[in-house]
Image: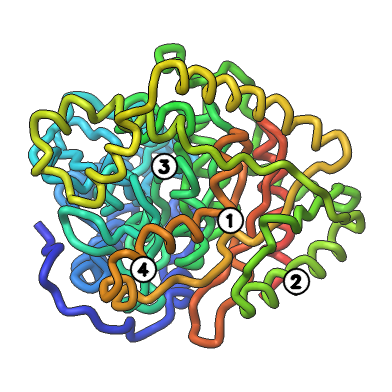
Amino acid sequence: MIPTEGTAVTKMPYTIGAAMRELGTISDLSQQMRKKELSPVEITLECLRRIERLNPRLNAFITVMGESALAEARAAEEEISRGLWRGSLHGIPIGLKDLIDTAGVRTTSASALHERRVPEKDAVVVLRLREAGAVIVGKNNLHEFAYGGSSLVSHFGDVHNAWDAAHIAGGSSGGSATAVAAGMCCASIGTDTAGSIREPAALCGCVGLKPTYGRVSSRGVIPLAASLDHVGPLAATVEDAAIVLQAIAGYDASDITSAEVPVTDYVSGLKEGVKGIRVGVPREHFFEDLDSEVAAAIEHALMGIQTLVGDMKDVRVEVPADRTVQAAESYAYHAESVAKNPELYRPETLRRIRTGEKVTAAEYIERRSELEMARRAIRELFANVDLLVTPTMPIPAPAIAELRQNPEALRPAELKLLRNTRPFNVWGLPAVSVPCGFTQAGLPIGLQIAGPPWREDLVLRLAYAYEQATA
């Protein structure tokens, strides 16, 4: 077991951009493995070495699955040597947010309540990764039960930002993002209820994709709010995110949130070009009260996108603000455990869960109906534009010490961080965060691109074109 609490925290000795380049992208690694120039065992060993070296600082993993990962890597090596090629994830080390079930390996949700919980079955997303030949290297730390955007509320200790360990990694998929950024795995699977993939991706300088609601099965994933939960990849590049999505997307008849909509070829569609794509910029709400360095980076990114697409205009969109559905559904899942074992929750998590205690059935039904209407109404916007572009975060990653010194500032800081991502969960739209610059202090800044339902291909295409056109 790698230690997760009580370890010294110091600044990383090298930049994570360098770490990503040293490890290589999924696309590059898979080509080398298919040509038998590189072994899955070599890649897995390198990731495990990085986990051993860096996890005491970053606390990105709760459970490291070293023995089984090496066994899976050897099996992948043997299959590839016999010409049994499963695709671009064959032999690639992947991390999992630790609320995604893994058969025979504990899934803790970063909570004392689930500290010894060992599922009997893999989540559907894990089954699909295994079918693609991926190597599961471990379970990533997170904000307890995914109920927050800092990953500072965890039974297993704080998650630290790979670019500067004095700052938060974001949440709730904080361990997933910082693990990818530090090259401890080639990609990770996270969940996103209000921004929990895109926020840490932006703060940690990697790519985070929230697919359309229902695109990826959530069966076997501990829920925060079933009407808003999404499962998706965090990766070093847009192409890598597309490769992972290709493997995990698809209908699951046993998941009532899953939709039977055909999956397109996300990877080959990346290079189709973006000239003529109509981009909308919703400045109201999304561009308000931005950090000055974030604002400058976003405006520079918009100029680049304008050059790429040629058609960009400001648009106005009604932004939903009510959080009754999330509060009610979260409380419904936890009600029995809260009544029996409240002491096993972190105090702040318990407080947040109990905000849904007094929501009546009538209130919930009304708010749930409004959510469905919002999802239908937002589609009208895409009659005039193809994609929306906003800042992912209004501010860079806050310092951990500042939030610790003033605990009452934690929730307001998280709500501000999630301000631009939350609406896309209500709408259920696909949205990705891609890196678009750095502050003078060296903290990453993210750009958010969103599109109409089921058009992950279009969202990824613009993200890829922007990524390729920038340094």
Circle on res. 299: 2
Q: CA distance from mark 2 to mark 3?
A: 29 Å
Q: Given the image, on which type of amino acid does mark 1 rest?
A: Ser
Q: CA distance from mark 3 to mark 4?
A: 18 Å
Badge 2 crowding class, 10 Å Cα cut-off, few under 14, some 14 to 19, many 20 or more, is few
**Residue 34 appears in the rendering:** no
Q: Given the image, on which type of amino acid does mark 4 rest?
A: Ile
Q: Find residue 268 and report its horizontal and vertical position in percent.
A: 68, 42
Q: Given the image, on which type of amino acid does mark 3 rest?
A: Thr
| Left or right: 306 as drawn, with respect to 461 | right
| Residue that mark 4 sits on | 168
| Residue that mark 3 sits on | 191
273, 377: nearer the viewer: 377
Give the answer, above or below, for where 364 lies relative to 463: above
| Residue that mark 1 sits on | 433
* Callout 3 secondary element: strand
